[in-house]
Amino acid sequence: MTITLELYTKKFPDLSNLIVPWNLKGNDELEGYNSYTWNPNNTKDTVFIILKETPEIYGTIYDKEIITDMIESAKRGVYEVPKELIDKFRRDDYIVFADRKLARIVYKNPDIKKSLPFLEKEFTFAEFSKGRPLFNTQIEAREISKPETFEIMLDFANYLSNEYDGIVYEAKTNRFGVSNIRDKLSLVI
């Protein structure tokens, strides 16, 4: 099973002080990225660490019909969908950017995550970043032979998150935060 932890930070993670003690091996294969391989605790498990060198605003492309259907479903429920959010979707051609406009909408409408839960990831990023660009780091293991490799990956993500003002996300579980990811993924590893 492949596990990918995504780390989004406000500052670029500097791993230069970890290369020797953690035996990180640099790879220059990807232009615009710093990438490393790592074998935690000298296991045969290989963890890939990929750091994007330039920050960007998180965004997701959605099909117009999906957004429209979800808005209509929310309206039929008990939730109000702010007009400014609908206008933003249309203006951005249904690409949901976690930009300053979305951050303001989330700030003014704290229950919006309940009304449109399929956009929780975008709302969380907008809230966390206040609409500013973030650096993306992926920590990935394609096959894990030892459960402690997963724990070490989570600890590493948590360290970087704390050190560089970040937030950790895991797509399979759609969870934010190391403890939430640990609880959910430890059931399947």
Image (cartoon, helix red, strand yellow):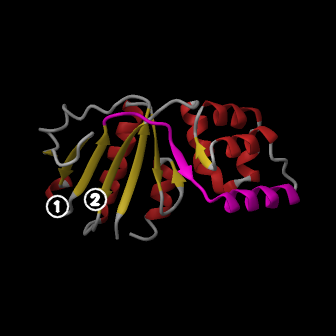
Mark 1 crowd level (few <14, some 14–19, many ≥20, 10 Å Cα)? few
Span shown in magenta: 53-77
What x and y, as percent, mark residue 97? Answer: 58, 42
At x 46% / y 69%, what residue is drawn? 187
What x and y, as percent, mark residue 91? Answer: 67, 41
Q: Secondary structure at mark 2?
A: helix
Mark 2 = which residue?
149
At x 61% / y 36%, what residue is drawn? 127
Viewed as shown, does residue 110 lie left or right of 118? Answer: right
Viewed as shown, does residue 36 lie left or right of 99? Answer: left
Q: Are marks 2 and 1 in contact (CB under 8 Å)?
A: yes
Viewed as shown, does residue 106 lie left or right of 41? Answer: right
Viewed as shown, does residue 60 lie left or right of 88? Answer: left
- Mark 1 or mark 2, which is nearer the start of the sequence? 1
Mark 2 crowd level (few <14, some 14–19, many ≥20, 10 Å Cα)? many
Indicate the quadrant where residue 168 lies.
Answer: top left
Quarter of the picture containing the C terminus is: bottom left
Hey, what amino acid is under mark 1? Answer: Thr
Q: Is residue 55 magenta?
A: yes
Indicate the quadrant where residue 34 lies.
Answer: top left
Mark 1 = which residue?
43
Hey, what amino acid is under mark 2? Answer: Thr
